[in-house]
Image: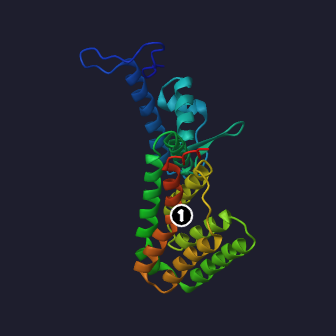
Amino acid sequence: MSDLPRDAVGVAPRSVSGAPSPARRSRQAQQAIQDRIKDWILDHGLYSGDPMPTEWELIEHLNVSRNSTREALKALQALGIVEIRHGFGTYVGDCSLEPFADALIFRGRMSMRGDRHELREILDLRRALEAGLMNLLIDTIDEEALTRLRARLHDLEACAGKGEAGDAADRAFHDELYGTMGNQLMSQLLRVFWDVYHDLSHELPPVEENRDNIVAVHRAIYEAVAARDAAQAMSAVKEHFAGIQLRLDTADRPPAPAPVD
């Protein structure tokens, strides 16, 4: 059985007469194996949760080594394309956005060591996405969805009344708000941005926030959506992000000088 080119261990990437380096050829070969496995899934009409061929069946189909096959499957598992259940076999994965979220969180943490520019970019993207969806949301939301959204607002108000942060209630409000559009990918993506900021917010300096103001901002979003006022809804969403922006701005301020005796 002939295998595709493998990594040259200990050899630095180089090019002779414009030819790809051994390391680059190895990456290209490994990507080609991954692409063939993905094509196999599509060609056979498999969906999330369906069983994949056994490891040896894949090796025979791909005509590559066991190590190359395992490496490809591990890479696809990291992307959520396949799921390896030890002792049971390999299955088509759910292609979740968790790897994307993990990468964004790590990227944001790296940004914390500098000027937090990338964290601001994540915030700008989330703000633009949520505000930009208002026209579509208002066209699709019905009275039943508004009733559920109002219930999530009441949950947030209850948390504020108890002096609680209400993070879970906040997330539930946003899940309900955009879930009415029935776009699962959009809901997953928005949930990723919420989770990323929530995870990174613990590394930002605390800012004293009035819980009543937080509730008021969410109430303004609900009332604008209920009134089918897209412009006001966009404005309310942007106001919601003002508190997050304040935390970033506070983090960027130089520390106050120590008092002189």
Q: Does 231 sit above or below residue 171?
A: below
In the figure, residue 234 lies in which quadrant?
bottom left
| Residue 226 drawn above or below residue 14 | below
Examine the rendered structure and indicate whether residue 136 appears above or below residue 242.
Answer: below
Determine the secondary structure under disc 1: helix
The residue lying furthest to the front in this view is 261
Q: Position of residue 197 (x, y in %)?
A: 56, 54
Residue 99 at x, y percent in the picture: 55, 45
Instruction: Say which residue appears at 46% left-offset and 66% top-offset.
Output: 130
Report x, y in % for residue 95: 54, 50
**Picture residue at 52% right of the left edge, 68% below the top:** 240
Q: Residue at x 49, y 65 (%)?
A: 242
Percent of width and height locating residue 129: 43, 63
201 relative position to 241: left or right: right
In this view, the residue in front, 4 or 168, is 168
Q: Nearer the viewer, residue 72 or 125?
A: 125
Label 1 Cα neighbours within 10 Å, binned few <14 / some 14-19 / many ≥20: some
Q: Which residue is mark 1?
A: 243
Q: Using the rendered view, name the quadrant where residue 14 is placed.
A: top left
User: In the image as oriented, which residue stretches furthest toward the left?
Assistant: 17
Give the residue drawn at x 53%, y 50%.
251
Amino acid bearing label 1: Gly
- Check the image and report above or below for 21 versus 93: above
